[in-house]
Image (tube, coloured by chain):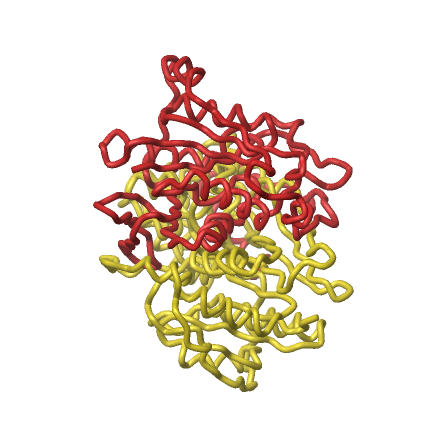
Amino acid sequence: MRIVVCIKQVPATTAEKRYTADLRLDRASAEAVINPLDEYAIEQALRLQESGAVETVGFLSMGPEQAAEALRRALAMGGDDATLVTDRALAGADEWATARVLAAALDRLAPDIALMGMASDDARGSLVPGAVAALRGLPLLSYGAELSVAGAHARIRRLTAAGFDVIEAPLPVVATVTDQVGEPRYASLKGIMAAKRKPMETWSLADLGLAAADLHGAALTRVVEARKPEAKPPTERVENASPDEAVGRIADWLAARKLI
Amino acid sequence: MGKDVAFLAEYSAGGAARSALELAAGAAALARQSGGIAVALAYGPGSGKAGELGAAGAVKVVVLGDAPAPAITFAAAASAVVAELRPLALMAPATPNGRDLAAALVGLLGLPAFGPVRAVSIEGGNVRSEQATLQGSVITSSEPVEGAPQPAVVLVLPSTFTPAEGGSGTATVTPAPAGEPGPFGRATVVESHPAEAAVANLEEASVIVAGGRGVGSAEGFAPLHELAAALGGAVGASRAAADAGWVPYQLQIGQTGKVVKPALYVGCGISGAIQHRVGMQTAENVLAINKDPDAPIGEFADLFVVGDLFTIVPKLTAEIRRRKGT
């Protein structure tokens, strides 16, 4: 039984972001981290490995060369090996192109479970997992609060509008998990040392049998404008007021805005 | 070149989702600009009644299936309908189910994808989507590249469009051509556990009173429920409060919970970390009550009251009831 966790390197949540002249995110300018929501997928995979349900855990990322750092950090948390797909032709890849490339890489890695986080911190479309499943012709188990494996099936617990469902599919599957699977572990010093000796392969588009032309120049979408959000009026503060005074101020504020 | 604007219309035992009514109105408005019609792709229990979406703006309704299955199960049927119709745009609600079904179409048909968006328009015959990226630090507008296949798939956040009121239009209803569900049909619901108590649908609330770590306990939410009742709203929470088990996860607002856009958001004992902020920053009015004068929510709330929520909230509830005369 093998899981491959797909991870994305993203700018740190709190980092200052800049756009390049052609309206792409200047990824070199911002501190980069593993997408925080992917860390939960890593944690889930490692827990399954520790429980004996899964033998090996691999990591897969598509990105610029420095995305290898994210894979090393994942390997420091645990797991066995990593694969980086990097190619200049992939700069600015959109969700469709990303899904196409990950699907091709996963076809080659052939895991029983391709596991992903529920969203990326930067774009938040959450479309890549479903598109990868469609391209590979596999069932999707999405938004799992927990992932488990029993025999030749994988199952997830998934929140519904009120309550939860258990959804099951025969392996192989594409799956995603939420931040409810449990807090991701920190890499230990021992883990960081061990990660340096774990195998990491680097593949180009050609290695996957894909050409830039297959990807429509890496994107079917283009950004036509990027701007700062409208500035909001400054916050009105109520401090050092008695409770009655504060309540009066709030009620006046609500009334002025026709909210009561 | 297709001119129609299609949208995913989710149904459940309770009828059409609010997102279906919002997208019907949005699709009708966009179709007026593009010179086409609004087409609903309806799925889920009760979707056989989706002809009612005519009153909301749809001219044509195609029913994908009425099984109580994960939305992606309908991907093969949706793909066949979309490939035949080739609309200009396909809008999907930015919910787990809407995203999954939209994602499957992106993969099956090789389509450009956008969102989650807070505005969408037709510019020179092209679909333009406006989205907040990188935790809302940048607003980008995007379009399909020239020669991209149609439709443009657009994920739409709740409350981006306002449902049409008192519409009287009618829609023709046809079932999707019968076909095999394919690999997505291999994922099946094997257990279904309803909640012990009714859970509010935050995406439909116009007022939300949200509690965070500062609320301290499940019992601490009682005054928030009172305030929400006085304001005619619902109670939400930060991830800290949901993780602590004080409220069900369905009430969590933020990056990994619901994205809401109420007329009024009241944050009680919520610090306002970026992960929470991305779920509520488009609320029209933000009131925050926190005893920490340095809480980040004080940076972006419209009104920030520094004080003890357990003193202020009950007094505020009483004052609102007094002013409303209820």
Question: Within the image, what quadrant is residue B198 found in?
Answer: bottom left
In the figure, what tint was chain B given? Answer: yellow
Is residue B192 among the parts visible in the rendering? yes
Residue B176 versus residue A156: which sits nearer the camera? B176
Q: Residue drawn 46% across and 77% down?
A: B176
Number of numbered discs on residues: 0
Residue A123 location (% of width, % of height) = 57, 44
Residue A158 or A212: which is nearer the viewer?
Answer: A212
| Residue B151 drawn at (x, y percent) | 62, 64
- Residue B294: x %, y % from top left: 52, 30
Query: Looking at the picture, does residue A197 appear above or below residue B220?
Result: above
* Residue appearing at x 37%, y 50% in the figure: B224
Asked if B284 appears above or below B91 in the picture, the reply is: above
**Colour-to-chain, red:** A
Q: Is residue B26 above or below residue A151?
A: below
Residue at 49%, 46% in the rendered image: A103
Residue B317: % across, % down: 40, 54
Answer yes or no: is residue B311 visible: no
Q: Nearer the viewer, residue B30 or A113?
A: A113
Q: Is residue A211 left or right of residue B324?
A: right
Tell me: A242 left or right of A123.
Answer: left
Quadrant of the drawing holding the N terminus of chain A: top left
